[in-house]
Each structure stands twice: as structure tokens, then as C-alpha cells.
Amino acid sequence: MVAGPTSAGPGKDRLRLWIRLLRASRTIEAELRERLKKEFDTTLPRFDVMAALYRSPEGMLMSDLSRFLLVSNGNVTGIVDRLVSEGLVMRARRNGDRRTSMVRLTEQGSKSFAAIAAAHENWVGELLGNVSEDEARQLTGMLKSFRSNWEGRE
Amino acid sequence: MVAGPTSAGPGKDRLRLWIRLLRASRTIEAELRERLKKEFDTTLPRFDVMAALYRSPEGMLMSDLSRFLLVSNGNVTGIVDRLVSEGLVMRARRNGDRRTSMVRLTEQGSKSFAAIAAAHENWVGELLGNVSEDEARQLTGMLKSFRSNWEGRE
DNA sequence: TTATAAAACTTTAAGCTTGAAATAATGGCC
DNA sequence: GGCCATTATTTCAAGCTTAAAGTTTTATAA
């Protein structure tokens, strides 16, 4: 979805907006992915999972992770598997329900993430450098405002 | 990159903006992907390639496609291979340079794309329904304005 | 010329991603 | 208790994606 509208007409402005939105996020995403790889030998999906877990020290269910990250269940399984094998994440069995397990960062994972997150924030600040903090707040508000349109869809 | 900032401080507003941008585009992208699959049995990457080719009836080089779509060379090879095997796209040998070939839509591909693109535009109009055309133009302008920051970075 | 570098692609290995099917455990309900 | 739907997760096949290595062709230039 990176190409432009193929003709003129009503509704084209929204299509243009969508295309710009997509190009912007893809460009930034590609740059962040590359830096995560080069500087920390990790990936964006791993970073995403660790970021989610960092916010929930008590842990998260696989389905929580999947819902929060907007990706499929099976996807999360694979990423968590790899993080576990790297010692950054652990699955804790639960007494109540043997179908589920709480996933949380190990101590090593938590330390590791804190370092990456700091760099990550600086990168984003740099990549969005010519958006003033005011503009950033304004844009964020606009994005928030039209979020309601698809909220709860997925 | 879907999680929120892990603490407060300067630069946080840009991080919040980035996270909202990413969530917005991922949500819309997921919805479009699902509809492309259900309604037309195709995928977003295929649609992207076809959209690019539709704009260039004379054809595009693989490297043009790759640059335009912001994806790697090898990636485009695979997608075009599949589109060729489906009869939607063709590689035309060139006399001048035997390393390259012009990739373009077949007649079937062109017809097929036109139908999908019409639906696609309606979907985007619907998903961004509560952004007025005015707001859309305004947001588009803002996104364009801070594009210069990473322009040409790739 | 004829090496040698550069350009355009393709191939490969590893990982990400989805949707669908399979497993396993739980929670009603008779 | 025993059946049955539901829930939570994993597995699977197919396709997407990248970076890096490999191939073929073209351009440079000594």
C-alpha cells in the first residue's frame, strides 16, 4: 500500500492521507529495525514483546500480548519461544488454569530492555526531530480522535 | 513498537506520536489485508506491486519497484515471481541491458487491479471515515512537512 | 584487450506473519 | 459424573521480509 491514487475524485484525500501515513511509518520502522539489529542484535518484534512485558512486571498471558500488540496468537508463540531460549523471558506456570502461563521478563531481560529502550527513545526523537513537541501533541490528538472509527474492530 | 513510553520526560511526546502513528497504520493495514484476502484472495504486497505497475504502463525495473515500495530487492523478486505465475504480471526482456527486464502488468493483471483498487479506495474512505476531507488534507500536509527529516535516508 | 569494479538481480537462511487446524484444559448443564 | 461448547495456546503451511552471499552482465580503465 505505498502507491498513490490512480485517478482523481472524492475520497482521494483520505486515500492520500493513508498512503502518507503508511510511508511514514514504514520508513521510520525500517530505520528502527536496522538500528536494533546493528546496535543490539535484536529485532522489532522482540522489542515490542519486551516493551509490553516491561510495562507489566506481574506478567501477561499470551492472549494479552497478542491483543495488545495487534498480532496473531501463533505469531507471539514463536517470538516468545525465541526470547525464552535467549534467557530474556520466562513462562511461569499458574495453579489456577493449566492452559495458560504468565509470561514475564527475566532479570536479564529487564536490564537488557531498559538499555535498548533508552536508545530507542533517542532514535525516535531524532527521526521525528523536525516535529516540535507541540506539533507532536497536536498530531497525537488528531490520531487519537479518529481512532474511534475502528476501535474494537479487530 | 506498539507499547507506550516507559517513563515521563522530554522527548516523550514524539515517542507517543510515533506509537500512535504505528498503531493507526497497523490497525488499518490489518483490516485492509484481511479484506483483500477475503474479497479478492490476494495480499497487500501483491496489491502494492500491482499498484506501482499500474501507474507505469511502460513498466518498471525490479530496482525501481524495490526503491518505490521501500522493500528489499530479494523481496520484490519473490512477489513478482508469484504474480507472474498467476498471469498478472510479465517480465519483458530488454535489448539494451540483459541484466534487467521491464516488469509490467498483463492485460489480465491490469483489469484485475482496477477492480481491486476501486474497492480498496472505498475501504480506506470507510476506515478513515471520521476524518473530514479537510482534516485529511491538513494531516497529509503535516506528514509531508516532517518527511524531509529522513528523506533520502532509505 | 583484459582485468576489475560496479550494477541488476536472484538465491539463501533465518525470522516474522497470518489463518486455519489441532491440543489441551476449563466451565456449564443434564 | 459425563457431554459439549468455550477458551488458551500451539502447530502448521504458505507467504512475506531482510541481510548477505552469489550470478550474470555492463562499464571502466590501464
Image (tube, coloured by chain):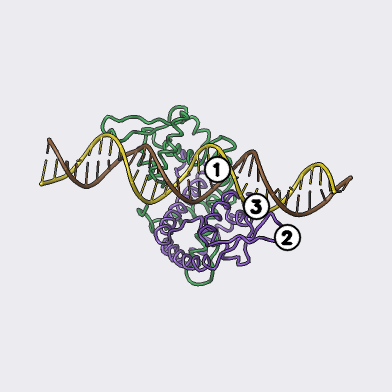
Chain colours: A purple, B green, C brown, D yellow
Is disc 1 in contact with disc 3, using a CB cutoff of under 8 Å?
A: no
Kind of residue sitting beneath label 2? Gly
Q: Would you say C3 lies left or right of B66 here?
A: left
Query: Would you call the spot at circle 3 few (<14 residues within 10 Å), some (14-19), or many (20 or more)?
Result: few
Task: Give SS at disc 3.
Answer: loop
Task: Give SS at disc 1.
Answer: helix
Residue where numbered disc 3 is placed: A152
Residue at image x 52%, y 39%? B43
Calculate the distance from the C-alpha at mark 2 to the C-alpha at mark 3. Answer: 28 Å
Disc 1 and disc 2 on one polypeptide chain:
no
Kind of residue sitting beneath label 1? Arg
Task: Give SS at disc 2.
Answer: loop
Q: Which of the two labelled residues, at mark 2 and mark 3, occupies the earlier sequence position?
A: 2
Which of pointers 1 and 2 indicates the residue nearer the eye?
Answer: 2
Residue where numbered disc 1 is placed: B33
Disc assigned to residue A58: none
Q: Please name whichever residue, B63 or A36, is drawn nearer the observer in this view of the structure.
A: A36
